[in-house]
Image: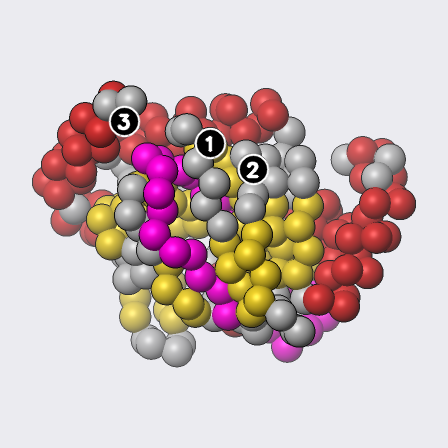
Amino acid sequence: MTQEIKGFDLIAVFLKNKFLKDKYVIVRYFLPLSVMRISSEYALKQMELGNLGLGDEQVKNTPCAYGDPLMDMLLERFCPKVEANTGINLLPTYSYFRIYKHGDVLKKHKDRQACEISVTINFWSEDSTEWAICLDGVSETAIIQLNPGDALIYRGNELPHWREAFPGKLQMQVFFHYVNRDGKFAKWRFDKRTRLSGLHGVEFPEKTITIKIQEMMRANKKGFEKLKQFLFRNSRKS
Ligand SMILES: [Fe+2]
């Protein structure tokens, strides 16, 4: 890993300076193709098996997963790369992913403290539809297109960000969240879980909500079946 990063030293210095100035940076080809392929196949399989949550407060009726073991493993594995592109020593907090469907909208928002440094990565897009993520930067609004494999690293709890309605069919987007190891949010290491990949309740102090992933999955099982049929019916129409 260390050697891999050294090969990109010059690019990393450029990106690091850009992140320092703008509080966000785009990293093209962040993800190796092999990781992208196997992870997206895995996520689609999880969706097919009914192992994903069915939506959350931000995006309703869209398959999603918090702290999935594979994604949390990647969160940790890619931490050095995010450190190299930001110049900040980081602690992983949690991963999250969604398989967005046609028409999904992400309202303008800032992330919570555990998302001090956020990374959103396009893992897979069914028909390569362009779908911009927008963010209010330090001096301007940025409209950013991410191709599969590309990542946007940004200060999630500082820069408001959003997406307009998704014009494509399906797109898998993965989020890696970190905090500054030496900063005031370091207490969010592992999102206050005892370890990564844990499927257990997590207290959100801002809202004092307890998310119980397994209960959510059970509760949504019926609705998920309907959604799955809808998604697969529509993905065959092309
Ligand atoms: Fe966000």
Is 214 on the left or on the right of 180, as rendered? left
Q: Nearest the camera: 46 or 102?
A: 102
Q: Could you tell me how far apart the alpha carbons at marks 2 and 1 are, in whole angstroms?
A: 8 Å
Q: Check disc 3: other Cα within 10 Å, few if <14, some if 14-19, many if 20+.
A: some
Q: What range is drawn magenta here?
A: 160-187
- Quadrant containing the N terminus is top right
Q: Which residue is mark 1?
A: 128
Q: Quadrant of the C terminus?
A: top left
Some atom of ligand 1 lies within 8 Å of the CB belonging to the residue at label 1: no
Give the answer, above or below, for where 204 lies relative to 97.
Answer: below
Circle number at residue 147: 2
- Kindly indicate the quadrant of the structure image that contains residue 170: top left
- Which residue type carries mark 2? Asn
Check disc 1 and give the amino acid type: Ser
First reached walking from the N terminus: tag 2 or tag 1: 1
Q: Is residue 237 left or right of residue 130?
A: left
The number of numbered badges drawn on the structure is 3
Gap in Å between the C-alphas at discs 3 and 2? 20 Å
**Residue 102: percent from left, percent from top:** 29, 42
Q: Secondary structure at mark 3?
A: helix
